[in-house]
């Protein structure tokens, strides 16, 4: 028999109509069966979405701070030694960073970092927050500039100027609606001049990115943190930003080579520094969220499995109840495949209807979570499409056995059934 | 019927050759049909008689290709059926045989049109044509006013007329009826018998299984079964011609 697409669509349409009639006939039963699939699809969809949301949040916070960069961290407890060599503590200095900037290709900007929590006071109003002592490069790497006034500049760093750029939250806490640029503020009692306000970044995972301030690194060192560091040129951390698309794997190797050379690290000895890249953070977070998502989906899948078993159960009941109808249809010319398809479609329709409602509920819950819990739960078209297709597959998988059983009935045995 | 037989007109429409059906029930072998060879020609109106357990229904199920013989052969329109696949048998039932049952066997919650159109679904006919042909058959059966009724809204006689329309909608060669009046009162039975006689006049071969002499006497030929064997096969003398040509709708 030749395959006629129009005919095939028409026969599927007929099956869908037969299925809907059968489902209406046992409305209560159909609803309860659907509920199983509904809950399953709801749970799985939400699990996938939560996983995607966690992933997106982490990506957001990484990108929010700065993409395509390497972070240099001194390893203070590294003990290097051996015959004839003194123990040496891991360090990272401004000169190391300059060398990296000079010798490593692809560098867009570098930024040293000294962080310290300070009390900021203006005419009796006080707030405590952690700020960063750094250079112009910090604004470039983190893509974070001043919206009012200006950022710190090279001159500020050279002269260890007492200038501060405030985050939005700090600015509002100290000055309210007043333009803070040009105003004076005391940092741990030392008078500073406000030169700018940083553009708003918002918060990720409840961490307010605007509750901060920026001062020149030289000022931070001289006024606040100098005596906590092992040397006059030491850094807590340093950032190296690379050109868009530049290989961070290559960059990490290059930086390692430069620093190893500067610290004369022998092969086999541990490095007195650590280098992490945004690429690694992303990979690690993907691994973690991937595991989280897999665990969630696995748990949710159990409910879907139970829903599928419900489908199989009810389809077996349906086939038994309608044995006579099956016999009649066979007498009227239905082939085994016609009967099989009829029941497959019925199971698939049950699942798709349940799945669609489950998807809508998941979407509503996702939107509610996003709105009220400040946690993105994105259900994209792909997830939605996947949920529907998956529901249909569950129908076909769990409806398969009952449908095949129906199709294998002997016409006369089926017709004789009361 | 526009289709012409593959063989000549003298080929029997239904032929059985040494047809045997045995059941095994609790270690006991039951010979439901015990080697029946007979042939039914095109245009005949045959009543198959016999008491319950005589083998008449088993015989009918086998010539209707619903049941598989233990041995022997059933030929429909000259074509042997024993080697056919289940799909080929389904097609044969769909195209050449129309079934009418005692309990009508209409689909509940389904309109007359949709009930009558069911065989056309399996014949691969498109939706539009299905509706047209089902409607035409229902009008032929005097049910033009009952097209959109579900079986629950129809009398027994009307339901059996819908079932007959369904049996005829694929323009089969044979109408096989198993106790078609068993669930009807005598007046309605007479009405259905009249339909059968009219269809037979129009050229359709009618085979009716019944245990009632009055129903059998509407046929032209009468075959009686007992214990799986044909004990009598003769023309009907004093044939009853059903009256009351106005269909009771």
Image (cartoon, helix red, strand yellow):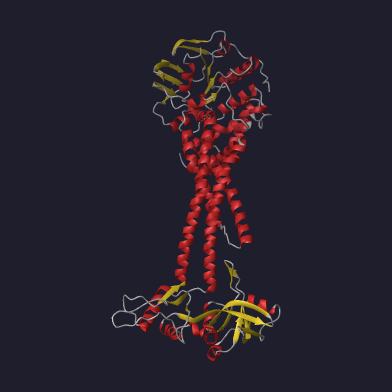
| Identity of the residue drawn at 66% across and 86% down | A182
User: In the picture, which quadrant includes the N terminus of chain A?
Assistant: top left
Q: Position of residue A334 (x, y in %)?
A: 50, 33
Q: Nearer the viewer, residue A344 or A147?
A: A147
Residue B3 visible? The answer is no
Relative height, residue A141 to residue B201 (above, below): below
Q: Residue furthest right?
A: A177
Q: Position of residue A290 (x, y in %)?
A: 47, 59
Q: Residue furthest left?
A: A83
| Identity of the residue drawn at 54% across and 57% down | A49
Q: Position of residue B191 (x, y in %)?
A: 63, 18
Q: Nearer the viewer, residue B19 or A162?
A: A162
Residue A397 visible? The answer is yes
| Identity of the residue drawn at 39% across and 78% down | A272
Q: Position of residue A308 (x, y in %)?
A: 51, 43
User: In the picture, which quadrant includes the C terminus of chain A?
Assistant: top right
Q: Quadrant of residue A107?
A: bottom left
Query: What is the number of callouts on the image?
Result: 0
Q: Is residue A310 left or right of residue B190?
A: left
| Identity of the residue drawn at 45% across and 70% down | A279
Q: Residue furthest bottom?
A: A159
């Amino acid at each position: 028999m030749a395959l006629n697409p129009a005919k095939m669509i028409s026969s599927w349409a007929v099956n869908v109509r037969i299925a809907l009639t059968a489902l209406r006939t046992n409305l209560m039963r159909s609803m309860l069966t659907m509920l199983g699939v509904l809950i399953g699809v709801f749970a799985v969809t939400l699990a996938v979405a939560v996983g995607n949301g966690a992933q997106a949040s982490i990506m957001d916070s990484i990108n929010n701070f700065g993409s395509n960069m390497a972070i240099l961290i001194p390893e203070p407890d590294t003990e290097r030694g051996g015959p004839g060599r003194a123990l040496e503590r891991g360090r990272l200095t401004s000169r190391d960073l300059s060398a990296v900037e000079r010798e490593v290709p692809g560098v867009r900007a570098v930024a040293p970092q000294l962080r310290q929590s300070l009390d900021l006071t203006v005419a009796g109003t006080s707030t405590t927050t952690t700020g960063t002592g750094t250079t112009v490069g910090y604004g470039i790497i983190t893509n974070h500039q001043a919206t009012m006034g200006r950022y710190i500049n090279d001159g500020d760093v050279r002269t260890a100027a007492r200038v501060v750029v405030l985050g939005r939250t700090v600015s509002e806490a100290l000055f309210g609606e007043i333009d803070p640029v040009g105003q004076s503020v005391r940092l741990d009692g030392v008078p500073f001049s406000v030169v700018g306000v940083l553009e708003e970044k918002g918060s990720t995972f409840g961490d307010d990115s605007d509750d901060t301030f920026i001062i020149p690194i030289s000022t931070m060192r001289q006024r606040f943190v100098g005596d906590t560091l092992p040397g006059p040129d030491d850094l807590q951390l340093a950032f190296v930003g690379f050109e868009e698309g530049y290989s961070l794997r290559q960059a990490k190797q290059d930086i390692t080579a430069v620093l190893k050379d500067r610290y004369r690290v022998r092969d086999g000895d541990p490095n007195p520094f650590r280098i992490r890249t945004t690429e690694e953070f992303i990979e690690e977070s993907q691994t973690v969220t991937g595991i989280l998502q897999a665990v969630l989906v696995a748990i949710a899948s159990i409910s879907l499995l139970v829903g599928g078993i419900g489908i199989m159960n009810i389809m077996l009941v349906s086939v038994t109840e309608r044995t006579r109808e099956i016999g009649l249809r066979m007498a009227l010319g239905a082939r085994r495949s016609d009967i099989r398809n009829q029941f497959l479609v019925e199971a698939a329709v049950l699942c798709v209807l349940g799945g669609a409602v489950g998807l809508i509920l998941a979407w509503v819950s996702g939107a509610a979570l996003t709105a009220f819990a400040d946690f993105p739960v994105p259900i994209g078209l792909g997830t939605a499409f996947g949920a529907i297709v998956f529901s249909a597959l569950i129908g076909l998988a769990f409806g398969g056995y009952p449908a095949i059983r129906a199709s294998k009935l002997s016409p006369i045995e089926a017709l004789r059934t009361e | 019927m526009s289709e012409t037989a593959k063989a000549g007109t003298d080929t029997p429409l239904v032929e059985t050759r040494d047809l045997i059906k045995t059941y095994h029930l609790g270690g006991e072998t039951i010979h439901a049909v015990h080697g029946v060879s007979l042939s039914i020609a095109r245009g005949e109106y045959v009543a198959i008689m016999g008491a319950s357990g005589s083998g008449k229904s088993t015989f009918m199920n086998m010539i209707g290709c619903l049941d598989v013989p233990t041995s022997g052969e059933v030929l429909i329109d000259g074509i042997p059926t024993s080697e056919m696949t289940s799909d080929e048998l389904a097609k044969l039932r769909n195209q050449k045989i129309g079934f009418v049952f005692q309990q009508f066997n209409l689909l509940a919650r389904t309109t007359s049109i949709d009930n009558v159109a069911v065989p056309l679904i399996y014949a691969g006919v498109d939706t539009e044509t299905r509706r047209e042909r089902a409607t035409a058959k229902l009008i032929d059966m005097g049910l033009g006013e009952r097209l959109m009724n579900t079986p629950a809204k129809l009398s027994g006689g009307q339901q059996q007329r819908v079932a007959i329309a369904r049996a005829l909608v694929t323009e089969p060669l044979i109408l096989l009826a198993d106790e078609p009046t068993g669930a009807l009162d005598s007046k309605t039975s007479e009405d259905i018998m009249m339909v059968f006689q009219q269809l037979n006049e129009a050229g359709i071969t009618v085979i009716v299984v019944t245990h009632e002499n009055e129903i059998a006497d509407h046929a032209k030929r009468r075959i009686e079964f007992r214990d799986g064997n044909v004990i009598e096969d003769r023309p009907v003398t004093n044939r009853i011609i059903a009256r009351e040509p106005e269909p009771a709708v």
